[in-house]
Image (spheres, grey):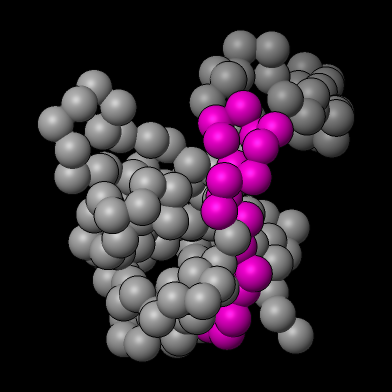
Amino acid sequence: MRRFALLCCAAVIAGCAKKDEVPADTPAAAMTPPAPAPIALADVAGKWNVTGKNEAGDSTLVTYTLTTTADTTGWTITFPNRRPVPVRVVSVSGDSIVISAGPFESVLRRGVQVRTTGPLRLSDGKLVGSTTARYSVKTADSVRVIRMEGTRIP
């Protein structure tokens, strides 16, 4: 009987003992931060002042107004002193919206047609991403990557 009582006490003590918060053999994947919240078109609906910079981020190449809606219709890019360019929403997945525009006359290369495509994300209230510009030329410099950052127009 004493053994039984002793075993019961040992079981209670073992059950009440504190456990380590993270076992030493926990895989790193189990400790990764959660994925970012998915983005919706309604999250970015409105007008944005966008600045495009070179890949190093030290030179402004282009500025424009991006008009967005809560669905895939009515998106446009408007460069200063130009007509709006229609934008197509290619996909909305995870934290990214992939957009495409063109062909239209390049702002950076007068008389040259360009097509652009790239992902956008919301980060700290700004619309950020990159766009790949593909110019209709037969030279080695037919592609350029531009870093984009947009601030919402109130």
- How many marks on residues? 0
Nearer the observer, 84 or 46: 84
| Residue 81: x %, y % from top left | 51, 76
- Viewer can see residue 153: yes
The structure residue drawn at horizontal position 48% and vertical position 42%, both measured from the top left corner, is 146
Nearer the observer, 143 or 138: 138
Q: Is residue 134 above or below residue 113?
A: above
| Residue 101: x %, y % from top left | 29, 64
Q: Look at the image and say whether residue 48 sits in the magenta stretch.
A: yes
In the displayed orientation, state which residue is furthest to the front.
111
- Viewer can see residue 100: no
The structure residue drawn at horizontal position 64% and vertical position 69%, both measured from the top left corner, is 49
| Residue 50: x %, y % from top left | 60, 62
Nearer the observer, 99 or 102: 102
Q: Look at the image and say whether residue 32 sits in the magenta stretch.
A: no
- Which quadrant is home to the C terminus? bottom right
Which stretch did the figure color magenta? 43-62
- Which quadrant is home to the N terminus? top right
Nearer the observer, 130 or 77: 77
| Residue 72: x %, y % from top left | 32, 81
